[in-house]
Image: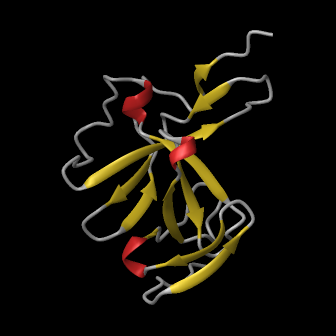
Amino acid sequence: MATERIISDITIMSSHFGELEINPDTIFYFENGMLGFDDLNNFVLITEEETAPFKWLLSIENPDISFPVISPWHILSDYNPGNSIDLETHVLFSVITFDDGKGNITANLKAPIVLNITDQTGEQVILPSEKYNLSHIIKQNTK
């Protein structure tokens, strides 16, 4: 069941980021949630200087859930999500896994997060191209 779009200032407490005052203009509304997190609909993008170029997509409904994300162009300079995404109004991010169980750092290039900066909505889409996968290795464990 979808949570309503947040339209007023809100204060949340996150175990990772502490207390945050969130302006509704900075909240992205995911009507269908994210893959595997259908009940989380309101997210804010957090930038921390010490973790750049990574950002964090933080759930407003459950502030202990945040996804590390990065621009897919930081990983592949020729990344191409296809013609259905308007790069004038959409910003893309790939979800990062810092340990895939084998010690590798991976990025989900197959299902990017698409943020519409015009209407502050978001969605996670699955690209039809077989060129990208869910666990693109950014840094391989060498141990």
The structure residue drawn at horizontal position 63% and vertical position 78%, both measured from the top left corner, is 12
Q: What is the x, y in percent for residue 24?
A: 42, 80
Residue found at the far bottom of this picture? 8
Pick the front one: 110 or 10: 10
Q: What is the x, y in percent for residue 103?
A: 77, 24
Above or below — where is 40 with respect to 124? below
Residue found at the far top of this picture? 142
Pick the front one: 59 or 114: 59
Pick the front one: 33 or 107: 107
Q: What is the x, y in percent for residue 77?
A: 33, 23
Query: Quarter of the image containing the N terminus?
Result: bottom right
Q: What is the x, y in percent for residue 129?
A: 39, 30
The structure residue drawn at horizontal position 38% and vertical position 46%, both measured from the top left corner, is 92
Query: Quarter of the image containing the C terminus?
Result: top right
Is residue 129 among what the camera can see? no
Rendered image coloring scheme: secondary structure
Is residue 120 among what the camera can see? yes
Disc tally is 0
Give the left or right position of residue 116, taking residue 17 as reference. left
Residue 95 in which image quadrant: top right
Residue 78 in which image quadrant: top left
Give the left or right position of residue 28, taking residue 139 as reference. left
Residue 10 in which image quadrant: bottom right
Give the left or right position of residue 37, taking residue 112 as reference. right
Residue found at the far left of this picture? 88
Above or below — where is 78 with respect to 71? above
